[in-house]
Image (tube, grey):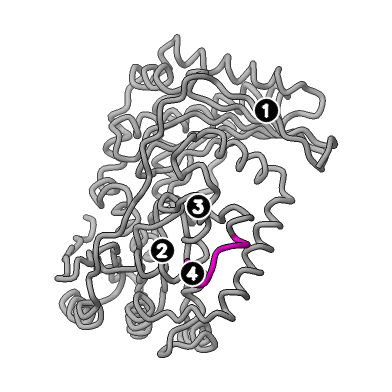
């Protein structure tokens, strides 16, 4: 029987999710903020990711030289992530040491310093990170596809931000972004592990409830107009490999179509891992696209990508092209598989296998205490914790006719963008 979850909303608007798990003496503490690249305006892209970096540069109570040593000394791990819709920070520690995480995160919710010297140091780090990514053909292709797939929605920008913006963003830009979004009213605290519920709730209330609520922050994203036609882009650059990425506009996490789309993804290219930690190691060799493209030597590899988001995003199929095949031949074979889905009901046994694989990957990404704490807050970013608890149930409801309907609705040429990276021509 699953452990019960206690949800409390503090007077300042902070949502607290607590789950007692007494299987091992550890606790995982996550703080989630509803801010990501979706909340950035042109000219200020990359703010959310850069602010995440600055949160590791210290407060007066926790100077930068103290933070990492303190977590390591207590036998813990910690990290942070910025995505399209959210930013998250976590610490997993021995149960008796968790107060360090509680004090650290409640402090840096409001007291991070953003010292000018640290801002400039991180500018160099982030620009180097960006330039390193630009050397990777798949990053260049994915960025071009994502940018071209959206006309007005901020999802068109890479999370790390545009290089021109990274060169111009100021310390005040970063600090104002931090003060606008790092607020109790815009946050979810999720904790799972070996603790006493009442004692933990009292300590959370003691540390977090004095923090000022602040106004609801702006979320400026506007709905993306429906695409009117297929787009095709070609990039040239260094390397020896041709890559193809086909991206379709896809439903958001709260859309009733999401779960059927997830099963279709599992059927076509193998299941997408929803956990930000990945995991599972499930082969996609039984997927339809692997058998049609890789086994028949039209591609070296095939992978699909589909994630839960607040607004409709993209479903991408990424192919490493076979060196002796033209990209057009590989794309034609992909189209034939999609057309098959649209015209013929998928056999029940294939649906059952696709659902089983999606369920297994979901289970692998949910089993340890850190992952349990992750899911408490993660699902609140785009839906609610019930989305997690009903995930397997909703997958099981998907039928062959659902798959056919979803394929007809979303996998149409006017819903997609085709990007091809050709090596050895230009830079």
**Is 426 left, or right, of 357 in this rendering?**
right
In the rendered image, the vertical position of residue 98 relative to residue 159, given as above or below: below
| First-in-chain label (3 vs 2) | 2
| Circle nearer the viewer, 3 or 2 | 2
Q: Residue at x 40, y 46 (%)?
A: 362
Q: Is 183 situated left or right of 314 in this image?
A: left
The image quarter containing residue 318 is top right
What residue span does the magenta drawing correspond to? 166-173
Give the Cα distance between marks 1 and 2.
Answer: 37 Å
The spot of residue 392 in percent (x, y) is 31, 40
- Rendered image quadrant of residue 298: top right
The residue labelled by disc 1 is: 294
Mark 2 and mark 4 lie on one chain; the one further toward the N terminus is 4
Q: Which numbered disc, 1 or 2, marks the residue closer to the eye? A: 2
Overall secondary structure of the magenta section: helix
Residue 16 shows in the view: no
Badge 4 crowding class, 10 Å Cα cut-off, few under 14, some 14 to 19, many 20 or more, is few
Q: Which mark is residue 88?
A: 2
Secondary structure of the residue carrying numbered label 4: strand
Q: Position of residue 132 (x, y in %)?
A: 71, 57
- Image quarter (top left, top right, bottom left or bottom right) of the N terminus: bottom left
Q: Is residue 292 visible?
A: yes
Q: Position of residue 236 (x, y in %)?
A: 77, 35
- 205 and 230: which one is in front? 230
For the point 74% across and 51% down, the residue is 135
């Amino acid at each position: 029987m699953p452990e019960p979850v206690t949800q409390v909303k503090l007077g300042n608007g902070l949502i607290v999710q607590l789950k007692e798990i007494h299987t091992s003496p550890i606790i995982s503490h996550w703080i989630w903020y509803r801010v990501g690249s979706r909340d950035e305006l042109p000219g200020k892209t990359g703010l959310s990711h850069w602010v995440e970096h600055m949160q590791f540069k210290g407060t007066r109570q926790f100077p930068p030289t103290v933070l990492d040593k303190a977590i390591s000394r207590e036998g813990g791990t910690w990290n942070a992530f910025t995505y399209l819709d959210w930013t998250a920070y976590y610490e997993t520690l021995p149960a008796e040491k968790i107060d360090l995480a509680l004090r650290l995160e409640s402090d840096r919710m409001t007291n991070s310093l953003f010292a000018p010297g640290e801002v400039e140091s991180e500018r160099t780090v982030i620009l180097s990170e960006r330039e390193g990514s630009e050397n990777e053909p798949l990053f260049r292709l994915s960025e071009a596809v994502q940018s071209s797939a959206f006309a007005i929605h901020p999802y068109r920008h890479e999370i790390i931000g545009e290089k021109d913006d990274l060169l111009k963003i100021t310390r005040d830009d970063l600090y104002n972004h931090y003060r606008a979004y790092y607020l109790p009213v815009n946050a979810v605290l999720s904790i799972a592990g070996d603790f006493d519920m009442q004692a933990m709730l009292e300590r959370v209330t003691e540390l977090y409830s004095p923090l000022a609520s602040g106004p609801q922050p702006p979320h400026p994203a506007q709905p993306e107009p429906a695409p009117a036609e297929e787009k095709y882009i070609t990039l040239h650059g260094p390397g020896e490999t041709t890559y193809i990425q086909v991206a379709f506009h896809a439903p958001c996490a709260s859309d009733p179509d999401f779960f059927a789309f997830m099963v279709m993804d599992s059927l076509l290219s193998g299941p997408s891992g929803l956990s930000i930690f990945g995991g599972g190691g499930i082969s996609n060799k039984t997927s339809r696209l692997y058998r049609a493209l890789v086994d028949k030597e039209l591609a070296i590899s095939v992978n699909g990508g589909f994630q839960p988001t607040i607004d409709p995003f993209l479903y991408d199929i990424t192919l490493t092209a076979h060196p002796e095949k033209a990209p057009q031949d590989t794309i034609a074979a992909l189209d034939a598989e999609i057309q098959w889905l649209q015209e013929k009901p998928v056999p029940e046994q294939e649906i059952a296998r696709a659902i089983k694989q999606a369920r297994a990957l979901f289970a692998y990404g949910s089993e340890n205490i850190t992952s349990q704490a992750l899911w408490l807050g993660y699902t609140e970013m785009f839906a609610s914790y019930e989305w997690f608890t009903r995930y397997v149930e909703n997958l099981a409801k998907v039928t062959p006719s659902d798959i056919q309907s979803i394929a007809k609705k979303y996998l149409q040429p006017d819903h997609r963008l085709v990007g091809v990276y050709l090596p050895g021509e230009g830079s």
